[in-house]
Amino acid sequence: MNNSAFNFHALSPDLILDALESVGLIAESGLTALNSYENRVYQFLDEQRQRYVVKFYRPERWSAAQIEEEHRFSADLSRAEIPAVAPVMLQGKTLHHYHGYMFTLFPSVGGRQYEIDNLDQLEWVGRFLGRIHQVGSENLFTHRPTMDLDEYLTEPRTVLATSELIPAKQRTAFLAILDDLITVIKEYWHSEWQPRRLHGDCHPGNILWRDGPIFVDLDDARNGPAVQDLWMLLHGDRSEQLIQLDILLEAYGEFADFDSRELALIEPLRAMRMVYYLAWVTRRWQDPAFPKSFPWMKDEDFWLGQAAAFKEQINKLRAPPLQLMPMY
């Protein structure tokens, strides 16, 4: 899908208010823009003083069927009493249409930021991820994609090859090291994993804390290996990551089985995310929000740094993968 040409120039405050009115909501307060690059997200109070968040989806990214699958997954998690924020049902639907835009309402939930160095919180998150994957393994998405190398490497490589953001004098060298990275990723990537429905983007910024974790923003939900929802919670040096991994998987294992062979996918997945991220920003560059938010993408030093990061990641790929601590 061509999702680079569209920006949100037509999404005026009046259109947003009219869209809300079309589903029976009158915004009593002003619209407060929340941090989101991919979509446009606003918080408001209605006439009953109930606080909502409305998300307007970037057109041409997901189809209606794909968005509705995400909503059903959220509903499945809610029915299982898992704290993932599910959309509000209005007029019998969770996905609404107005003047070419698709939008959804969510309850506004408050909470503190998840603390990445808090091992007790990590244990809680591991337990709930086990429950999320228990529900996620009941069936698969049929409209949303399954993680593969084409989406995360082949297509991004094509985008980057023609990107005007990469300085011309660096392009050949950058693409050469990118090709080296892709070659090594393919050496270490394997498909011996059982797909399941995933959160898909379970980094610390998508976890709030209020008497326990609250999982938000399932916009990147897809089928994939369980470790995709785990590896972004690890940080620090190798010894620290081993401790975190042990805590995370022990808690996870209370509700779902984890195939330890997936640990070998952590560094390939990290590398795939690095490549995908650069192509994602390139695809979105015509959206005025992106040049404002990522001005460094036009700097020569940035691309030199990315080439160096790719070389470092190749070394990480070739190092022994993380392993579970032995039991005594």
Image: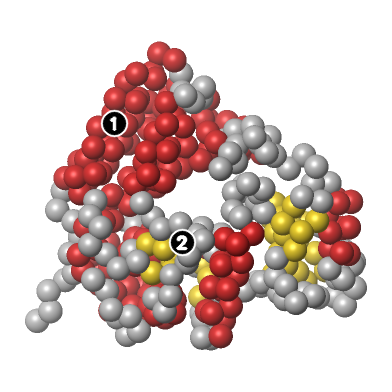
- Quadrant placement of the C terminus: bottom left
Name the one closer to the observer, 5 or 112: 5
- Compared to 35, does 196 lie above or below? below
The residue lying at 84 percent from left, 68 percent from top is: 23
* 59 on left or right of 232: right
Q: Which residue is tagged 1?
A: 179
* 256 on left or right of 73: left
Task: Where is residue 318? Give x, y as percent.
Answer: 16, 45
SS for dot 1: helix
Q: Which residue is tagged 2?
A: 222
Q: Quadrant of residue 153?
A: top left
Name the one closer to the observer, 150 or 87: 150
- Quadrant placement of the N terminus: top right
- Compared to 241, does 184 lie above or below? above
The residue lying at 20 percent from left, 65 percent from top is: 261
Q: Which mark is residue 310?
A: none
Task: Where is residue 27? Give x, y as percent.
Answer: 87, 65
The amino acid pointed to by label 1 is Asp
- The number of numbered discs placed on residues in the rendered structure image is 2
